Image: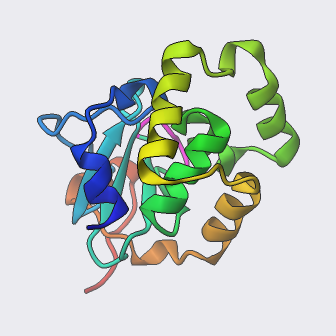
């Protein structure tokens, strides 16, 4: 059984760490074709997904971004959870694409972004149940994954290209 399958069976309020489980919610104009949503941030329509054809890579989808709406965060779900264990919440990871390391560290250090007791309980339960430890180099790993990714391989519904005012790629 994969870590993702184990995670799915857990009875935890993962919405507290930015991974609200809500299979009834649909995607957005910028959700890639072949996406399987694995969690919702709870604000701005931001969600996390796997995309068919990209293996276990975890992507962030941000409908409110004017520039890039979809970007990878981790090569696999295990790394994604380890990053969340370090950062305390998926929101910090989703923002890395726009930040330098100083901004990331400042965000994590701000009192309002530190995990509270209920959030800490979810993080601790994930670590213990799945046998995971925090990924200390989460910022560098996200930047590495993003730098190596070929964004031109992602495909979207026609609405995306219409909204962006760009021509869809060829077959």
Q: How many marks?
A: 0
Q: Is residue 148 magenta?
A: no
Identity of the residue drawn at 41% across and 45% down: 129
- Which region of the structure is painted magenta? 63-68
Give the farthest residue toward the bottom. 171
Q: Is residue 66 magenta?
A: yes
Magenta stretch mostly in which secondary structure? Answer: loop
Identity of the residue drawn at 30% across and 79% down: 53
Q: Quadrant of the N terminus?
A: bottom left
- The residue closer to the viewer here, 157 or 139, is 139
Q: Find residue 150 and report its horizontal and vertical position in percent.
A: 52, 78
Q: Quadrant of the C terminus?
A: bottom left
Q: Quadrant of residue 5?
A: bottom left
Residue 24 located left or right of residue 29: left
Q: Find residue 109 and report its horizontal and vertical position in percent.
A: 81, 25
Identity of the residue drawn at 43% across and 68% down: 57
Image height check: is 108 above or below 126? above
Q: Can residue 106 be seen in this snapshot?
A: yes
Identity of the residue drawn at 67% across and 20% down: 113
């Amino acid at each position: 059984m994969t870590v993702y399958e184990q995670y799915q069976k857990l009875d935890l309020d993962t919405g507290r760490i930015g991974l609200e489980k809500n299979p009834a919610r649909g995607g957005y104009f910028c959700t890639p074709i072949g996406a399987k949503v694995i969690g919702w941030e709870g604000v701005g329509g931001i969600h996390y997904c796997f995309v068919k054809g990209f293996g276990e890579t975890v992507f962030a989808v941000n409908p409110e971004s004017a520039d890039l709406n979809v970007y990878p965060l981790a090569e696999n779900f295990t790394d994604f959870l380890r990053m969340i264990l370090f950062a305390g919440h998926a929101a910090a990871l989703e923002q890395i694409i726009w930040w330098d390391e100083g901004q990331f560290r400042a965000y994590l250090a701000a009192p309002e972004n530190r995990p509270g007791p209920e959030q800490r309980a979810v993080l601790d339960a994930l670590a213990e149940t799945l046998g995971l430890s925090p990924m200390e180099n989460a910022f560098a790993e996200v930047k590495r994954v993003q730098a190596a990714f070929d964004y031109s391989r992602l495909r979207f519904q026609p609405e995306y290209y219409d909204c962006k005012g760009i021509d869809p790629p060829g077959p």
